[in-house]
Structure formats: C-alpha cells, structure tokens
Amino acid sequence: MLLKREADAVAQLLGETNSSKEVQLDKNVIDLKLLLEKVLNQEKLLASYAGMKVGVFGTRQLSILIANALRQNGALVSCFLQSTRDSINEIMDVPVKSIEEARDLALSMVINGVEGEHELDISEVLRDKLEGTKVISWRDM
C-alpha cells in the first residue's frame, strides 16, 4: 500500500498529464511491485488461497508467476484459461482449458492475469460464462 500511496502522491504533485496508455503502464508497474512485495514477504494475504481450487486466466508470464505464487501458498491451481483453446495443452504440468471447459471443473475462483486494456472486458466474460465462480483481477490478490 505504501508504494501505491507514494506513486499517487508523486502523480498528483507532477500534475500527471500522461497518455492513458502510459498511465496504464505505470499502474501495471506499481501493481506488479505490490504483488512481488507480497510474494517475497510471504504475506498472509496469499495464504488465504490455500486449499482453494483456482484457475488462472492467461498463459503469459504474469499468469505463470501468479500460478507459482498460488502454488507456493497451498492453492490448487487446476488450470490456465484461455478464451479459446489453441495449441498449448499445458504449462508447468497444469492443463490449459477454454472458458467453456472450465465450467465442469468446479473452481473456487478464477484470477484474471491480463494486465492490458482488455482486463475489465475479460473479467466480465469470465463472470458471465462461469456463473457462480468468483472472478478477481491479479491486482486484487
């Protein structure tokens, strides 16, 4: 939280005039630092995922890092999710599934590992298609 408050204070003092893409990139960096801090400090916040059956949306670096952090804190990472299945069958011995395939997995939660402009849209699609499954952004971990 301290990093976020510091960044907000600096942005306010500088009269932030960055483009929306630059602002998004800055936000990503701040949020990634906060997540890294939690993982390195092994904060109890991540321990709250222990025993949960979790899916991680995305198959890129951030999603893989999230899955590793969850596993280290006792979560059961059941799958990586994609909008549609492609040629990737598994990552780190974890199957890659389409959103439709995930309906049958009885996931406790899906963590959206997207960090770009489509993040909110993807979360909405996940909520619609995986009704009853909690969906959160990686930023909320």
Image (cartoon, rainbow, N blue to C red):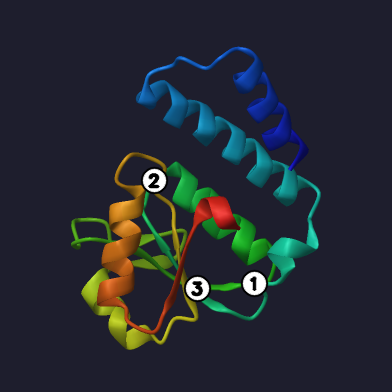
- What residue is shown with label 3? 54
Left or right placement of residue 140 versus residue 114 in this view:
right
Q: What numbered label is drawn on residue 60?
A: 2
Query: Residue 13 falls in which quadrant of the image?
Result: top right
Image coords of residue 2 (percent x, y): 77, 37
Q: Secondary structure at mark 3?
A: strand
Give the image location of residue 97, x and y in percent.
Answer: 29, 69
Q: Give me the residue at 73% from left, 28% from top.
A: 6
Nearer to the camera, 89 or 78: 78
Query: Quick one: label 1 or label 2, which is nearer the N terminus?
Result: 1
Q: Where on the picture, by quarter, is residue 140?
A: bottom right
Residue lying at 46% horizontally and 14% vertically, measured from the top left: 17
* Residue 85 drawn at (x, y percent): 20, 62
Q: Amino acid at mark 3?
A: Val
- Circle 1 Cα neighbour tier, 10 Å, few/some/many (<14 / 14–19 / ≥20): some
| Residue type highlighted by circle 1 | Tyr
User: Viewer-proximal residue, 140 or 8?
Assistant: 8
Query: Which residue lies at the image location 39% right of the left edge and 48% below the top edge?
Result: 114
Alpha carbons under labels 3 and 2: distance apart: 17 Å
Q: Which mark is residue 49?
A: 1
Query: At which x and y percent is residue 64?
Result: 48, 51
**Considering the image in quadrants, where does the N terminus appear?**
top right
